[in-house]
Image: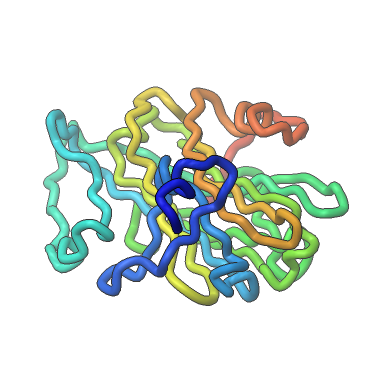
Amino acid sequence: MGFLDGLRGGREVDFDSGSAASNAIELTKRHNRVSLTKQGAATGNLRVNLTWRMRTSDIGGSQRESLLRHPFKALKPPEVLGHSQSMVNVDLDLGCLYELADGTKGVVQPLGGLLGDVNAPPYVKLSGDDRFGSASGETMYVNLDHRDQIKRLLVFVYIYDQTPAFDRTHAIVTLYPSNGPRIEIGLDERHPQARSCAVVMIENVKDELIVRREVQFVYGFQGELDRLYGWGLQWGRGYKSKADR
């Protein structure tokens, strides 16, 4: 790519496979999209994973540093934090607004038990609800073998009922395609009062599947994300069942 190509708008950047140590692509404000089609990863099940780690207030602390820049940090043992009043108690949930090629729209999320289906419309399935930021986190599957029936998917994260604390969690959404490197989107921008975040858009554009970083924080819930992206659904207050809590 020539020097001037990087200055021209409208041209998509072709990413390589990341470093050998991390085998990951990090989507940033500057490099905010990647083509699953060009990566040869537009088939099979796309796994979308949300993980976070509760932490103490880190005034003056550094932001999350990408393993792409510091791959040997993966070998460092995780920091052990003792329980104290300053620990963050937050329940992050993973969800997805979907729009299919036939115009069908809806949402997949833990609230209301709207867990979706991976083998039938909407071809998106949520597996489990992690309330404590465990190593496995929350996982969603997208069946890309039905990509022709998918118009756009907006993956989002929201705080269910605790105090807003996005800026005090190491939240990361990672996409694991069937082929090629994983794709990481960090939610490490400081929006202390935000309750929801539109993380990434997966869109079918002229038979090409594009993954685009959004990271748009809002102070409301799913209805506000809906209005921001023009989904047009009707929203009401939802609650988790006791079995989900």
Q: Nearer the viewer, residue 60 or 219?
A: 60
Residue drawn 78% across the image and 45% down it: 105
Q: Position of residue 154 (x, y in %)?
A: 62, 46
Q: Nearer the viewer, residue 89 or 219?
A: 219
Q: Position of residue 77 (x, y in %)?
A: 13, 63
- Coloured how? rainbow
Q: Nearer the viewer, residue 168 or 213?
A: 213
Residue drawn 25% across the image and 59% down it: 67
Q: Is residue 187 left or right of residue 56?
A: right
Q: Is residue 159 left or right of residue 232?
A: left
> Is residue 179 visible in this depiction of the protein?
yes
> Is residue 243 visible in this depiction of the protein?
no
Residue drawn 12% across the image and 46% down it: 82
Q: Which image quadrant is residue 73 in?
A: bottom left
Residue drawn 33% across the image and 62% down it: 135
Q: State whether residue 221 is above or below residue 70.
A: above
Determine the residue located farthest toward the right in the rendered image: 102
Q: Position of residue 113 (x, y in %)?
A: 65, 50
Q: Is residue 38 left or right of residue 59?
A: right
The N terminus: image quadrant:
bottom left
Q: Position of residue 195 (x, y in %)?
A: 47, 30
Q: Nearer the viewer, residue 145 or 240?
A: 145
